[in-house]
Image (cartoon, rainbow, N blue to C red):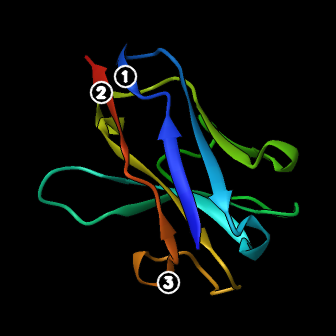
Amino acid sequence: QVQLVESGGGLVRAGGSLRLSCVASGRTFNLYDMAWFRQTPGKEREFVASIPWLGGTTYYADAVKGRFTISRDVAKNTQFLQMNSLKFEDTAVYYCAGRSHNGGAYEESNVNYWGQGTQVTVSS
C-alpha cells in the first residue's frame, strides 16, 4: 500500500499563489503516476493535473493550464502543485492521488491511492 499526505492548503486572495505538497510513504515503488484532483461541495472530484512518477508528459485540466504546475521529487517521495493566479473558482478541497499502473486518462474510478485532502480557499 501507498499512503499519501497533503499539505500546503490555506486561504489566499484572488491572484495569489499557493504550493501544495504530497508526501508518499509505504510501497512507493508501486507508483506509476500521481495526480491532483479537487472537489467542491455537491460536485464530483475533478482531475486537475498528473505526472508520471519517473518522469514524462504532464497533463492539465483546461481550467488550470498556464496557471498550475505539477512536479515531483522522487528522492523525497513528494509531488507538488504550484498554483499561481488563483481564482475564486479554484476554491476546493484538493486531493493527492496515485496509481500503480497506466490506466489511461485519470479518472476518479481508476485511482489506487488517495490522500485525505487539503482545503484551498480563494477570496475574491
How far apart are the alpha carbons under marks 3 and 2?
A: 27 Å
Residue type for callout 2: Thr
Q: Of the residues under marks 1 and 2, which one precedes in the sequence?
A: 1
Q: Of the residues under marks 3 and 2, which one precedes in the sequence?
A: 3
Q: Residue under circle 2? A: 121
Front one among 86 and 72 = 72
Q: Of the residues under marks 3 and 1, which one precedes in the sequence?
A: 1
**Above or below, 69 relative to 60:** above
**Above or below, 4 relative to 99:** above
Q: Is residue 76 left or right of residue 107?
A: right
Residue type for callout 1: Gly
Q: Position of residue 40 (x, y in %)?
A: 22, 49
Q: Is residue 56 left or right of residue 77?
A: right
Q: Position of residue 39 (x, y in %)?
A: 29, 53
Residue 37 visible somewhere in the drawing: yes
Q: Is residue 67 left or right of residue 28?
A: left
How far apart are the alpha carbons under marks 3 and 1?
A: 28 Å
Mark 3 lies on a secondary structure that is: helix
Q: Residue under circle 3? A: 110
Q: Residue under circle 1? A: 10
Mark 1 lies on a secondary structure that is: strand
Near mark 2 (Cα within 10 A), the count class, few <14, some 14-19 or many ≥20, is: many
Near mark 3 (Cα within 10 A), the count class, few <14, some 14-19 or many ≥20, is: some
Q: Are marks 1 and 2 in contact (CB under 8 Å)?
A: yes
Residue 60 visible somewhere in the drawing: no
Front one among 48 and 102 = 102
Q: Position of residue 81 (x, y in %)?
A: 61, 39
How far apart are the alpha carbons under marks 1 and 2?
A: 6 Å
Disc assigned to residue 18 = none
Front one among 26 and 105 = 26
Across the whole image, how many numbered discs are drawn on residues? 3
Screen quadrant of the N terminus: bottom right
